[in-house]
Image (cartoon, grey):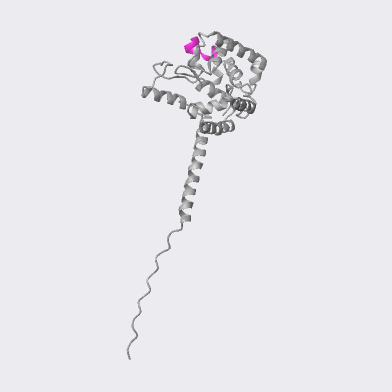
Amino acid sequence: MTEPAATAEPQPSPPPPAPRRSLARSIVRATAIAVAAALLLPLVAVLALRWIDPPSSAFMIGRSIERRLGKETTRGTRDRIDYRWSDLEDIAPSMALAVVAAEDQLFPNHHGFDLESISKAVEERESRRRVRGASTLTQQVAKNLFLWSGRSFVRKGIEAYLAAAIELLWPKRRILEVYLNVAETGTDLYGVTAAADVYFHKSPAKLTRREAALIAAALPSPTKRRPDRPSEWLAERGRWIERQIEQLGGEAHLAGILVARPER
């Protein structure tokens, strides 16, 4: 009796190809991680700068790169970027009042954005008239610290996100203090300490209301205007700022901000 022929063992079937869904999920996951990092990392920097005085700013770094690349402009140059930090209590209250009166009179009360000014700016853009500035001090701090110059919807969108974060994570006093120190105040000058020294040969604590108003008047174009040698326009702008300070109520307008340094 013959034995039955041995049957071949069945070969294992090859694994099914990985579904395309896995690749799609990986892409979505990687994108989500990248977006989360892009949103959260700036918040870490903003939070740290609530306590740490910024050693530089995006605008200063950009200017330094221009120097290294030899892209000097007609603005003229100094031997180096002149940036000196002063705490708010070491700056004359008139200087803080002057920049608020000149740049952002609603600063004590808004949450980072002047919606009325933004609406007017949009109307002027649509009517093709000269567009007025609508940036608050908070927005200018965000731009100076982290962003680049120029106009684009992308930059304005990032600026709005950072300004909202700054308003959320910093007290108003800190926003004003940082603004007074990082704002461009002249050719290669940043902050009111450098401006007070270069233009008036004194510390920022000793600035008079008139001198503070002239520095604030030059802020929209600080590389083209000299507070120590004001043009007729700049002198009149400075007088307007002084009148605005009076109409706002002087130091009372910044009550709760211009006080002794609180515990941060």
Q: Position of residue 210 (x, y in %)?
A: 58, 10
Q: Between residue 58 and residue 172, name the one nearer to us.
A: 58
Q: Position of residue 142 (x, y in %)?
A: 53, 28
- Whether residue 198 is in magenta: the answer is yes
Q: Residue at x 52, y 38 (%)?
A: 39
In the image, taking residue 192 as reference, residue 241 lies left or right, namely: right
In the image as oriented, which residue stretches furthest toward the front? Answer: 127
- Whether residue 13 is in magenta: the answer is no
In the image as oriented, which residue stretches furthest toward the bottom? Answer: 1
SS majority, magenta: helix
In the image as oriented, which residue stretches furthest toward the left? Answer: 2
Q: Residue at x 47, y 12 (%)?
A: 198
Q: Between residue 65 and residue 85, name the one nearer to us.
A: 65
Work out whether residue 252 can be spotted: yes
Q: Between residue 152 and residue 123, name the one nearer to us.
A: 123
In the image, taking residue 210 as reference, residue 63 lies left or right, namely: left
The image quarter containing residue 122 is top right
| Quadrant in the picture for the C terminus | top right
Q: Position of residue 30 (x, y in %)?
A: 47, 47
Work out whether residue 209 can be spotted: no
In the image, taking residue 228 as reference, residue 171 lies left or right, namely: right
Q: Residue at x 60, y 10 (%)?
A: 239
Q: In the rendered view, would you say 5 is above or below 30?
A: below
Q: Position of residue 22 (x, y in %)?
A: 47, 55
- Number of disc labels: 0
What residue span does the magenta drawing correspond to? 197-206
